[in-house]
Amino acid sequence: MKRRLFIASAVSTLAGCGPVSAALNQNQGVARVLASAEGLNHALIGTRGLAREYGERDVAPTFRVNGFATPSDQRYVQMVRGNFAAYRLVVDGAVESPQAFTLAQLRRLPQRTQITRHDCVEGWSVIGKWSGVPLAAVLAAAQPRGDARFVVFRCMDNDGAGNLYYESLDLHQARHPQTLLAMRLNDAPLDPDHGAPVRLRVPTQLGYKSAKWIARIEVVGSFADVYGGHGGYWEDQGYEWYAGI
Ligand SMILES: Nc1nc2c(c(=O)[nH]1)N[C@H]1C(S)=C(S)[C@@H](COP(=O)(O)O)O[C@H]1N2
Ligand SMILES: [Mo]
């Protein structure tokens, strides 16, 4: 655990969640340490453990906003104005039964509320109360096929140069009981800046895994052909794909 935290802080001083992460790629020594530690941490900590859950009085008064700018294109702005009535969460790819959920349908699935800490690789943390539908329930409706291995989250925002944010989990992480498609933060509907209408919350991993503004969930056998092939926007810049805390 100490080793993992040390590595997280090493990454944060080098890269944060910003474009400086190119420095990571140039630093072969750090890249080697990260590569070997990734396998080690995965093996030692695994993905079965539960992230700590806190009490109501631990909830921070405000939840910091981070990452790319809130989408400002016409499509998103219109959806916000229409209270997301036009939103559909598409679940497709290697599934028996592709889905396109409305928000109302997502709210009718079993919900879970959890007070957990969000840890950004930059070195800050904040505790929030999240509610939503466990990703496991949404996947169960879509029925992943036998060749399914990963779940890719395609987002509506971009880095300013037009490259869309995306993330991925393997099916085991995706079905973890605390992996939520969050629709509420601190007892209120999720606001645009925190990823409305639906964002991922993965309290067992670093903040960049918790994709905001999800448009589509694609189940795949491999993410080799998805964008840069490393399973996430930041992973394509050198971050670890497995970001367990
Ligand atoms: N779509 C999208 N999801 C994202 C990001 C982003 O830029 N775009 N940033 C990630 C990072 S680095 C962090 S720390 C958290 C920030 O979530 P918050 O704004 O709710 O604090 O979102 C994560 N998910
Ligand atoms: Mo982050």
Image: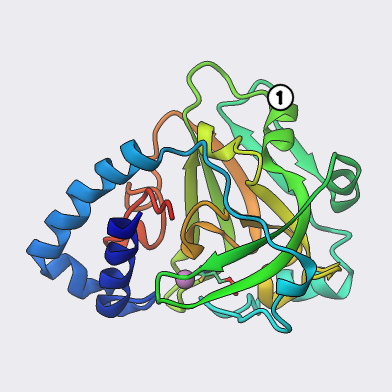
In the image, taking residue 19 as reference, residue 25 lies left or right, namely left
Q: Up-down: is 87 above or below 71?
A: above
Residue 137 at x, y = what percent?
Answer: 74, 34
Residue lying at 26% horizontally and 41% vertically, measured from the top left: 39
Residue where numbered disc 1 is placed:
97
Q: Quadrant of the C terminus?
A: bottom left
Residue 78 at x, y = what percent?
Answer: 80, 73
Numbered marks: total = 1
Residue 138 at x, y = what percent?
Answer: 73, 37
In the image, taking residue 21 as reference, residue 211 lies left or right, namely right
Q: Quadrant of the N terminus?
A: bottom left
Residue 224 visible? The answer is: no
Residue lying at 42% horizontally and 51% vertically, measured from the top left: 244
* Nearest the eye: 62 or 216: 62
Residue lying at 70% horizontally and 83% vertically, measured from the top left: 62
Q: Quadrant of ligand 1?
A: bottom right
Residue lying at 64% horizontally and 71% vertically, measured from the top left: 127
* Nearest the eye: 240 or 163: 240
Describe the colour scheme in one phrase: rainbow
Q: Secondary structure at mark 1?
A: loop
Residue farthest to the left, as pictured: 29
Amino acid marked by disc 1: Ser
Q: Up-down: is 193 above or below 117?
A: below
